[in-house]
Structures are given as structure tokens and as C-alpha cells.
Image (cartoon, rainbow, N blue to C red):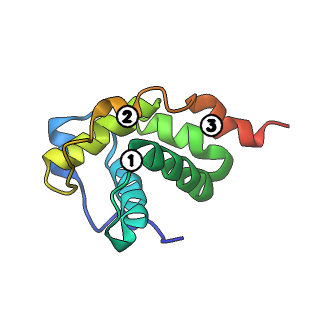
């Protein structure tokens, strides 16, 4: 797993336009995109959501839900919003089939990030 480098991009331009999400949330999502796009493969919203979940759980364990909600990421739709903010900033490219709707209702955030640690 690639270590997230929060210093490589401050995402200040995006956060200045849309302050709902912390720069660190964009760093995490960018790391996910990097992993998924190896080999030039286009990724679906479902693939992004699943890799985001796995990466957050791997990086933050039982604190993942707390960390993400602190950063403003509280539902799958937030990940979609962040993706399109990255597109608008020129950091990520999209094709004609990409839409924010592909991130709607992906999974229940609480269950996805707290469920693996329920005892």
C-alpha cells in the first residue's frame, strides 16, 4: 500500500472553492485514484468507493469513521463531490459516462467503517 503523502499537494485551491472537505480527504482520494488507475484503466464510481473504503480502513483502522467525518466525508455522495472537484481542478480526468450519480447510495458509511470493528 502506498503511503499517503499529505505534503505533495495542499489542495488549497479546491478547499478555497469548496470548504466542505478537508485537504487530507482529497489526499486520501487522490491516493485511491492513483492505485486504481495504474495501467491506465478507467475506474467506475463503485470501484472508487470500494477502494476508498479499503484504503481508509487500512490507514486509520477503527478511527476511519471518526477521521472521515471530521474531514467532512460522511456519505458516498461526498466522495463523488470530491471526485468532481478534482476533475474541475484539472487533477483528474473524466469520460462521458462519469457522473455524480454513480456515487449515490454506494454503502452505509457508519456500517462500512464501524461494522468491521463491532464486537
Q: Quadrant of the C terminus?
A: top right
In the depicted structure, whether residue 91 falls above or below residue 3: above
On the image, the x and y values in percent for residue 22 come to 34, 43
- Classify residue 66 as left or right of residue 101: right
Q: Please tell me which of labels 2 and 3 falls first in the chain.
A: 2
Q: Residue 42's image quarter?
A: bottom left
Q: Which residue is drawn at 21% across and 35% down?
A: 18
Work out how far the residue at label 2 is from the one at label 1, CA to CA, in angstroms.
8 Å
In the depicted structure, whether residue 20 falls above or below residue 88: above
Mark 3, residue position: 112
Q: Is mark 2 on a helix, strand or loop?
A: helix
Mark 1, residue position: 44
Eye-nearest disc, 2 or 3: 2
Say if mark 2 contacts mark 1, CB within 8 Å: yes
Eye-nearest disc, 1 or 3: 1
Q: Please tell me which of labels 2 and 1 falls first in the chain.
A: 1
Q: Is mark 1 on a helix, strand or loop?
A: loop
Q: Residue at x 54, y 51 (%)?
A: 56
In the depicted structure, whether residue 42 falls above or below residue 70: below
Q: Please name whichever residue, 86 or 3, is drawn nearer the observer in this view of the structure.
A: 86
Q: Residue at x 41, y 55 (%)?
A: 28
Q: Please name whichever residue, 10 or 102, is drawn nearer the observer in this view of the structure.
A: 102
Work out how far the residue at label 2 is from the one at label 3, CA to CA, in angstroms.
18 Å
Q: Please tell me which of labels 1 and 3 falls first in the chain.
A: 1
Q: Residue 81's image quarter?
A: top left
On the image, the x and y values in percent for residue 103 come to 40, 34
Q: Which mark is residue 102?
A: 2
Q: Which residue is drawn at 58% across and 45% down?
A: 64
Amino acid at each position: 500500500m502506498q503511503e499517503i503523502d499529505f505534503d505533495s499537494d495542499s489542495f488549497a485551491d479546491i478547499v478555497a472553492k469548496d470548504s466542505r472537505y478537508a485537504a487530507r480527504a482529497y489526499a486520501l482520494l487522490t491516493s485511491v485514484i492513483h492505485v486504481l488507475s495504474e495501467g491506465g484503466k478507467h475506474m467506475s464510481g463503485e470501484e472508487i468507493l470500494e477502494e476508498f473504503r479499503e484504503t481508509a480502513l487500512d490507514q486509520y483502522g477503527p478511527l476511519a469513521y471518526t477521521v472521515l467525518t471530521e474531514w467532512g466525508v460522511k456519505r458516498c455522495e461526498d466522495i463523488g463531490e470530491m471526485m468532481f472537484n478534482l476533475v474541475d481542478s484539472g487533477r483528474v480526468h473524466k469520460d462521458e459516462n462519469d457522473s455524480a450519480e454513480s456515487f449515490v447510495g454506494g454503502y452505509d458509511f457508519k456500517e462500512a467503517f464501524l461494522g468491521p470493528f463491532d464486537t
